[in-house]
Amino acid sequence: MAQLIVSGGRPLEGEVAISGAKNAALPILAAALLAEQPVTIDNLPDLKDITTSIELLDALGCRCQRLDSHSWRIDAGSAERVVAPYELVVKMRASILVLGPLLARHGRAEVSFPGGCAIGSRPVDLHLRGLEMMGAVIEIDGGYIKAQVPAGRLRGSHILMDVVSVGATENLMMAAVLAQGQTVIENAAREPEIVDLAHCLNAWGARVSGAGSNRLVIDGVAALSGGRYTVMPDRIETGTFLAAALATRGRVRTTHTDPTTLEAVLLKMQEAGAEVSCGSDWIELDSRGCAIRAVDFRTAPYPAFPTDMQSQLMAVNATAEGSAMIHETIFENRLMQAQELNRMGAKITVEGHTALVKGVAQLRGAPVRASDLRASAGLVIAALAASGETIIDRVYHIDRGYERIEEKLQGLGATIVRRDSPETEAS
Ligand code: EPZ
């Protein structure tokens, strides 16, 4: 099992190119199932979750051709299979995103029921309820969501979601694209990845409007044509590199990114005392010689502060002046990195969904263990700021969401290497 070994305590300095957004790429790959003609998707990040998605499309009968390390051509024209097997869904919960497209295209789908994961219980009731409102009949049998559309074609519907959900909004949007008539989704998620999916669907012949607002209107069409689409830049990867610059009191310019998708994060970094400047496709953060203060924040759906950046800013707070409260409102178990940060000398107390972080002058390297993707990003940031050596175990989590992370960090002057090591388990 791989580990990352980080020798920290040095400011990061330089320029780093941001990859395509994992959380936009996953629904866009699922959307390929809707198209009768081949689609080409560019700027896909080269990540484990993307490979798993391709395996799933393959299992569903798509012809998938890798054009280069970041582009795939998917032909779902003759794909007839409708079963998303347990073995793949268990590797990646986002596999649930094929449910809407399969039902819309074939009127039938069997998708292994995704369980919870390290960060929370993560139910899918909103996905299922919305599809039922569009005419699907759904039962859970043998661990599978078995869905069919007795009328043959889903029908447009007026759906009000009682919780803002990124995945449910995406699944229902994709299902509605081929439904009979108009679908309105109220209280829709507004994340930039939703907007990217809508742009992609429209580029392939769909009629989606309102993306980026909390009311989506989708006019069903008979078929999607196909075409080419470039995935948006990864705002969370961008924020992670900027947080690493901030924690190490360095200066980093992220390129090939989109500053308009990161406003809440950049405001917090400025409030902490960093200088932030932006161009149309770059963001630079300079914190050399700055006194960095701990900042309070609360995670919430876009455009508020993203839960996917919570762990990284916790690591910054751990090394800042003063104390701050962090409220995690999206997932029930997403403060797990706090205990590992405390092993590095941080002073963090967690109570329920709230963490009180008292900044310390210097974190110290230690062996730590990653529990999930973004928690591991927080540990890497803390390790870069800490004195001495940190060994981060279970880095397969980080590989799900960060392309060539150690290479990109090395380019910014970090001392970080990957090595294989036997795993030691504790209960
Ligand atoms: C997406 O997950 C992202 N994943 C997550 O990124 C991200 O943390 C999350 O949105 C929130 O921004 C992908 O895009 C692949 P939700 P998703 O449905 O869609 C509740 C990362 O690290 N809920 O918006 O699964 C749910 O329990 C990952 O990259 C229901 O109650 O999140 C949660 O409290 C992790 N019923 C809240 O909604 C449902 O049917 C938001 O979850 C669905 C969700």
Image (spheres, grey):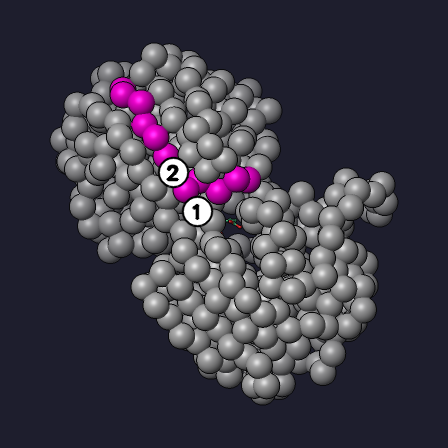
Residue drawn where x is 50% and y is 35% of the image: 69
Query: What span is colored magenta in the figure?
Result: 36-47
The residue closer to the viewer here, 52 or 95, is 52
| Secondary structure mainly formed by the magenta segment | loop
> What's the amino acid at mark 2?
Asp
Residue 354 higher or lower than 249, as above or below:
above
The residue closer to the viewer here, 307 or 112, is 307
Q: Quadrant of the N terminus?
A: top right
- SS for tag 2? strand
Residue drawn where x is 43% and y is 60% of the image: 255
> Which residue is disc 1 drawn over?
20
- Judge whether residue 222 is colored magenta: no
Q: Earlier in the sequence, mark 2 or mark 1?
A: 1
Q: Is residue 132 visible?
A: no
- Rendering quarter of residue 225: top left
Q: Position of residue 353 (x, y in %)?
A: 57, 64
Residue drawn where x is 55% and y is 40% of the image: 47
